[in-house]
Image: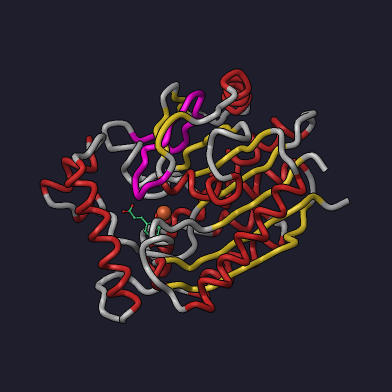
Amino acid sequence: MQQALIAMSHSPLLEHTNPPEDVKAAVEAAFDHVRAFAKDFNPDLVVNFGPDHYNGFFYDLMPPFCVGYEALGTGDYDSWDGPINVPTNEAEKLAQYIIDQDIDTAISRKMEVDHGAVQPMEIIFGGLDTVPVIPIFVNSVARPFTKVSRVRKFGQAVGEYFKDSDKKVLFIGSGGLSHDPPVPQIATATEEQRAFLTDGRKPTPEARAARQANTINTAIKFAAGEADIMDLNPEWDRAFLEVCKSGNVEGFDAYTADEMDAVAGHSSHEVRTWVAAYSALRACGEYEVDYEFYKPIKEYIAGFGVTTAVLKK
Ligand SMILES: O=C(O)/C=C/c1cccc(O)c1O
Ligand SMILES: [Fe+2]
């Protein structure tokens, strides 16, 4: 088996809020599963589809996709802070291949990636300086959003590139499922928020702490039924997981940005990373989802999903 997949939610609240013990234990068991899965698969390379939350990408230049040739973590919410082990030459060849398939992508020789991109690798491998990783940004917070069918085609191009590779490649998708954390949106932003969304790199320690405290407080209130954010939508989450399991990645095309906002929250777009990852795996062959965990967890502001998939023999 040359390709495999892990698609999972992330949450910066994992270390900051306190769900009931049985919920924490269930999430930890899911993390144990993905760690064992990755250890068993023993990838030579990870291709990591991740979102960003205005830590690395801003409205001064917001691409739908970006392949990182070199990258570093932003360290938000105590996530990976520093250089990432990216095989630059392979990333360059991958981007050229994607473009040759008539799918345009940005590239970066200094891509900054936040908790949303790095958390799965921190959980699975203990960091981003171990297994070589090509980080790929998939815009999941900043309108305008590219159509989901485009994300599928982008993922397919990535998968095709690796289909006959002699390397064992693990595709990771990080994000989702339904959730609506307090990340500002450009359409409703105040002047100050608009300035931040446009060019908010390198926040002061105070600004970063205030943002993080706001998210943590919102999560605590959300769990207590008192927060002014959209509820999680387990029904939507389960339907999305069914599409992942079906193997029919064209089924993702029915999702539209407006409907996702309306029924699953403004950060449900993070499932675009799953769409890219599942489409990449599908381009390598028929797959089966051999593990699924799901729980709506208000303390993490996340419809929390964890899946693994392998190619059919
Ligand atoms: O960027 C933030 O401040 C918050 C991000 C967040 C909160 C809850 C769930 C997630 O997936 C997030 O990325
Ligand atoms: Fe996120």
* Residue nearest the viewer, comparing 46 with 102: 46
Q: Taking the image as four quarters, which one is ligand 2 found in? A: bottom left
Quarter of the view holding residue 95:
top right
Quarter of the view holding residue 81:
top left
Question: For the N terminus, which image quadrant?
Answer: top right
Look at 31% across and 43% down and name the residue there: 54
Percent of width and height locating residue 153: 60, 41
Relative to 244, is 177 on the left or the right? left
* Residue nearest the viewer, comparing 16 with 238: 16
Look at 26% across and 79% down and name the residue there: 226
Quarter of the view holding residue 233:
bottom left
Look at 42% across and 47% down and name the residue there: 115
Residue ranking furthest to the top: 89
Relative to 190, is 12 on the left or the right? right
> Is 75 included in the stretch rendered in magenta?
yes
In this rendering, the count of numbered labels is 0
> Is 55 included in the stretch rendered in magenta?
no
**Residue 150 visible at all:** no
Look at 25% across and 67% down and name the residue there: 217
Task: Look at the image and give the residue range highlighted in magenta.
Answer: 62-79
